[in-house]
Amino acid sequence: MLKANYHTHTELCGHAVGKTMDYVDKAIKLGFKELGMSDHAHIPEYFMTGNEYKHNYLDESMTNDEFEKIYVKEVIEAKQNQNIKIFLGLETEYLPKFHNYFADLRKKVEYLNLGIHFFNYNGVNYSTYDPLNSELILGYTDTAIKAMETGLYKIFVHPDLFMINYYSRDNYRGFDKACKYCSKKIIDTAIKNDIYLEINVSGIKNSVKKINGKSEYLYPRTEFWSLVSNTKAKVIIGIDAHDPLDFEGQAVLKAKQFASQFNLNMCDFIKF
Ligand SMILES: [Zn+2]
Ligand SMILES: [Zn+2]
């Protein structure tokens, strides 16, 4: 079992079940020492077109009102618990054009997780889950680098998500020169800015696919973590829980097994 988890959602995001206390209770039962709550932060509609907003399911997520009145309240209440250390966090995106919005979010919580589910490239917002080619993954990478260099973020969650639907002229989901270039850039920037890279348990649970005839996770992606191997990059396992039961799922054990095949600088806890 893990000693801590800093990647936890709640029902407020619209695609998870359970309130903060349900996650806290489960974490205590399992003997976690620390728990970070990191629900998806609200993204304002004016950040993109109406179609882009819907395409990224942003209309279902937590509102700023729910954040202030429910989320923060629940987490502060949970902090009273003596059996576990609770941290108030958020998972959010980064758009350089709206830097101040993300800087303001950072002031309202104890830490931010960077999760790039969409990114702006040449004025268009792309979903990370869309089929991306070698040019578009540069857009993801550029956003990742700019975000990590702001100093706002503690953990880059599922940093390798950009390859989930990657395609090149002669290969679908292959790991080519462009993937390697982007992976290395991300890893180097994380090291330089002291940001934890996350092995995402939700990917282990939900993203097993055949790649070149072999069963692989689309993320965490073996080739990416091979490049992290033997570097100083700090690595953490993040459950990305959308249900309290995710804390004790088989996928957590599989994530540990996945990590153990590389020489990674694994961290049980985050230094705040
Ligand atoms: Zn989510
Ligand atoms: Zn998440």
Image (cartoon, rainbow, N blue to C red):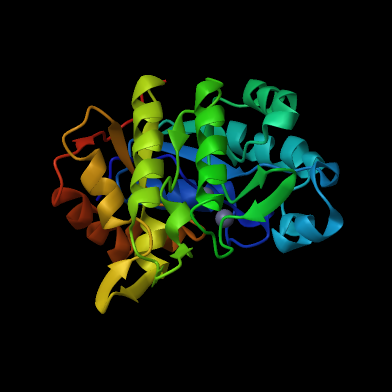
Does any portion of residue 125 appear in the rendered image? yes
Question: For the point 54% across and 47% down, which residue is it?
Answer: 21
Exactly how many numbered labels are in the figure? 0
Farthest front residue in view: 169
Q: Position of residue 250 (x, y in %)?
A: 28, 66
Which residue is at the front of the view, 103 or 37? 103
Question: For the point 28% across and 75% down, which residue is it?
Answer: 212
Q: Position of residue 140 (x, y in %)?
A: 54, 45
Relative to 120, say whether 250 is above or below.
below
Which residue is at the front of the view, 169 or 233? 169
Does any portion of residue 84 appear in the rendered image? no
Seen in the image, is 88 located left or right of residue 207?
right
Question: For the point 34% across and 38% down, which residue is it?
Answer: 184
Q: Position of residue 133 (x, y in %)?
A: 52, 59
Question: For the point 24% across and 42% down, which residue is it?
Answer: 227
Which residue is at the front of the view, 31 or 15? 15
Q: Position of residue 183 (x, y in %)?
A: 37, 43
Seen in the image, is 210 located left or right of residue 51?
left
Seen in the image, is 51 located left or right of residue 187?
right
Seen in the image, is 259 located left or right of residue 138?
left
Residue 214: image quadrant is bottom left
